[in-house]
Amino acid sequence: MDDSDPQPVKIDALDRRILAALQADAAQSLDEIAKSVGSSKTPVWNRIRKMREAGIIGAQTVILDAEALGFEACFFVLIRTSSHEAAWQAQFLRAVKDRPEVQEAHRLAGDIDYILKVRVKNARAYDAFYQALISEVNVHNVTALLSMEEIKSTTALPL
């Protein structure tokens, strides 16, 4: 194994309980986390620090209520392309990353090349997003699916 390869981090049951507590509410105090996982503050803090350094724990953010902020429309955008050259892909990735409406973007196996999760205020805002995207990148086919109801949404992993 090359020395530059990252070593996999081994996590135990206590680490998993700490991660579950953080996923549930990362704003809780270190005392609250330690109590909920059956440990004391110092070992919990050391484990959290090690998992951050290892990249297991990433950025801590706040989850906002999109609808309460007026972003009532969620579209899943299916994109097919006839171009798979590196230059096209770089241009597409740049366009997608530069658009704040895009919450998620995935490259897929199968008939659809990419799927985007796009959150906007309404259909008119989606059309503005769509027009901007196709002016930046040539795509073969775009299909937009409006989510009628969000049944489940989570960022939590099944630890």
Image (cartoon, helix red, strand yellow):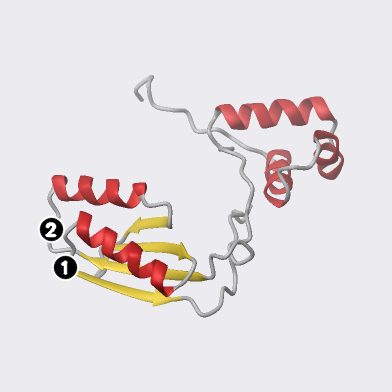
Image location (x, y in percent) of residue 129: 34, 62
Seen at 59% across and 31% down, the residue is 52
| Position above or below: 84 against 124 | above
Image location (x, y in percent) of residue 156: 61, 54
Seen at 43% across and 76% down, the residue is 146
| Crowd rating for badge 1 (residues with CA inside 10 Å; few <14, some 14–19, many 20+) | few
Out of 15 and 140, give the one closest to the viewer: 140
- For the residue labelled by badge 2, is the local secondary structure a helix, a strand or a loop? loop
* Of the image marks 2 and 1, the number of the one nearer the N terminus: 2
Picture quadrant of residue 94: top left
Whether the residues at callouts 2 and 1 have beta carbons within 8 Å, the answer is yes
- For the residue labelled by badge 1, is the local secondary structure a helix, a strand or a loop? loop
On residue 2, the disc is none
Relative to 112, 77 lies left or right: right
Picture quadrant of residue 65: bottom right
For disc 1, the marked residue is 140
Q: Amino acid at mark 1?
A: His
| Position above or below: 56 against 85 | above
For disc 2, the marked residue is 83
Out of 34 and 85, give the one closest to the viewer: 85
Image location (x, y in percent) of residue 15: 69, 39
Residue lying furthest bottom: 148
Relative to 138, 45 lies left or right: right
| Position above or below: 115 against 98 | below
Seen at 42% across and 63% down, the residue is 117
Image location (x, y in percent) of residue 125: 41, 67
Out of 31 and 87, give the one closest to the viewer: 87
